Amino acid sequence: MRIDIVTIFPEFFDVLDLSLLGKARQSGLIDLGVHNLRDSTHDRHHTVDDTPYGGGAGMVMKPEPWGNALDAILGAQPESDPADSATTKTPITGNAADAPTDTGPILIFPSPAGDQFTQAMARELSLEQHLVFGCGRYEGIDQRVVDHYSQRGRVRLVSLGDYVLNGGEVAVMAMIEAIGRLIPGVVGNPASLVEESHEDGLLEYPSYTKPASWRGLDVPPVLRSGDHGAISTWRRQQQIERTERVRPDLMPRRVS
Ligand code: ADE
């Protein structure tokens, strides 16, 4: 998978050299490009923001640097006859509802105003060939950037959760980790992906390792019984109890 990130803080993504995703990059499973938005400015101060039309607190990211940076990644919009607009779409095609088999990149803007990022979305995005992330800062990016690229192809606004971060970088890190580990070959043992929280709609069961007794706390005897049927049943019950207690909102949409 090819991943491009546009940000004013490229150093944020240095950690993608580490751990499983670092190995996935070395082995070519993930091909990462991190682009400094300021390199797409043409003024002496490399300005990326300006005051908001209509007033209000904070600054808004200017559209021109974003257009330059994203065109360099996605390809510039071809010159076209305005009367012929239906046939002028560039390589990013389709829309957010399209199946991941659609070709061309998908452009993702992390935003608290976006669709909630979930394990299902991570799985869907892990099937894509090219993801492009645009990390906004300040009060966000001029809306015309989203509108322009939505006319040209698939664009999604995605939220990490119902809280406000200082910018999109942390959200993109979390998304890349969740998506990247679902790419075949990134996680050594694929079985470990199957039995984890959210994959079957439930939270995962508690895990234990040696010693059998620690600080007066014993490993549940069933796990040491060697009875695989009983272990499976116990783990399922634990998943259900935990989900009912901690995340009752997940219960109706779980699979059996
Ligand atoms: N940028 C700021 N807050 C965010 C959030 N909750 N999710 C994604 N991007 C964000």
Image (cartoon, rainbow, N blue to C red):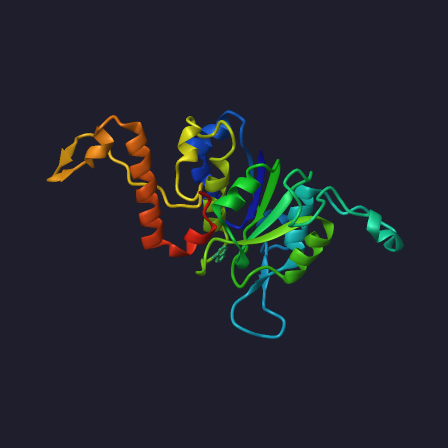
Q: Position of residue 225 (x, y in %)?
A: 22, 28
Give residue 56's quadrant in the image.
bottom right
Location of the C terminus (image quadrant)? top left
Q: Residue furthest bottom?
A: 55
Q: Is residue 217 left or right of residue 159?
A: left
Res. 29 in view: yes
Q: Residue at x 70, y 44 (%)?
A: 92
Depth check: give the residue in front, 133 or 99: 99
Q: Is residue 91 left or right of residue 186?
A: right
Q: Residue at x 24, y 32 (%)?
A: 223
Q: Is residue 61 left or right of residue 205?
A: right
Q: Position of residue 155 (x, y in %)?
A: 64, 51
Location of the N terminus (image quadrant)? top right
Q: Position of residue 90 (x, y in %)?
A: 76, 44
Give residue 230's quadrant in the image.
top left
Depth check: give the residue in front, 173 or 183: 183
150, above or below 126, in the image: below
Q: Residue at x 50, y 47 (%)?
A: 172
121, above or below 159, in the image: above
Depth check: give the residue in front, 163 or 71: 163
Res. 79 in view: no
